Amino acid sequence: MTQPVIVAIHQPNYLPWLGFFDKANKADVLVFLDNVQFPRRGWSNRVRIKTPEGPAWLTVPVSVKGRYHQMIAETEIRYQDNWVRKHLSKLERNYRSQPFYDAIAPVFEQLLTARPRLLGVLNGDIIQAMCELLKIDVQLISGSTMGVSGVSTQLLIDLTKAAGGTTYLSGEGGRLYQEEALYDEAGVELRFQEFDHPVYEQRYGEFVPGMSIFDILCCSGVEGTRKFLRESRQRFVSGSTIT
């Protein structure tokens, strides 16, 4: 029996949370949805970390004036405010006492100081590095290089087929908007991620889910993070198809 080729599609976010990498770990191909309009106040250029005052934002400044309709792939980073130094300083201030900070911090420092011009390149390089670090065996493709256009569910179907996929892996939120009949018509299986966020030891009070991947790596280390991802993938592979 031919094995399904599972394709996940997601905007290339900045220092994404663990759920992003859980989806990547359950897929054969991850398409960066960078051929859509840059979402202001979205996750493409910002993420949350844990601080003594609660969750706080790290935001990458980008050029938006006069560029309302620009795609994520076209969005340029602004370096005038030296945000790289500020982000690295904030990460150090809030995580340096965590057990795995010294092992993890140099990886992120190298990625952030590379200073690429485009946001999509920065995010893609970070995601690729994290996949390698966590031994996530997934092919990464930028949607902007695939020659596929469209909107909504049909765009996801066309990208899945263009990537050689037989199955589209949607996040849990997709249950609210996916037009499942279109997948049936296109001969594409629809599955959902079903991500259960692990509770691990954090500083600064009660556990807060949804922090940057930097958070769990500093708190639980590479092996601890990989262990969760392996277990989550095993449950997904052994589970039944959900549509």
Image (cartoon, rainbow, N blue to C red):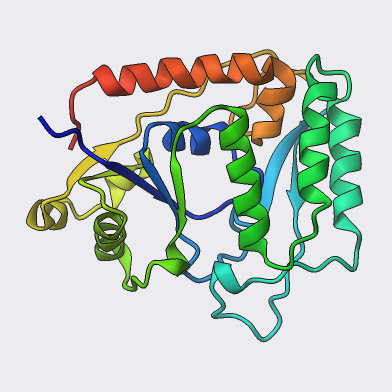
In the image, taking residue 3 as reference, residue 11 lies left or right, namely: right
- Count of number-bearing discs: 0
In the image, taking residue 57 as reference, residue 67 lies left or right, namely: left
Q: Position of residue 37 (x, y in %)?
A: 50, 71
Q: Quick check: can you spot residue 53? A: no
Q: Position of residue 221 (x, y in %)?
A: 69, 18
114 w.r.t. 98: above or below: below
Q: Position of residue 242 (x, y in %)?
A: 20, 32
181 w.r.t. 227: above or below: below
Screen quadrant of the C terminus:
top left
**Residue at the farthest front position:** 2
Screen quadrant of the N terminus:
top left
Q: Quick check: can you spot residue 211? A: yes
Residue positioned 80% across, 14% down in the render: 99
Residue positioned 63% across, 30% down in the render: 133
Q: Nearer the viewer, residue 195 or 146?
A: 146
Q: Quadrant of residue 234?
A: top left
115 w.r.t. 80: above or below: above
**Residue at the farthest bottom position:** 66
In the image, taking residue 51 as reference, residue 163 lies left or right, namely: left
Residue positioned 68% across, 52% down in the render: 46
Q: Position of residue 95 (x, y in %)?
A: 83, 26
Q: Quadrant of residue 134?
A: top right
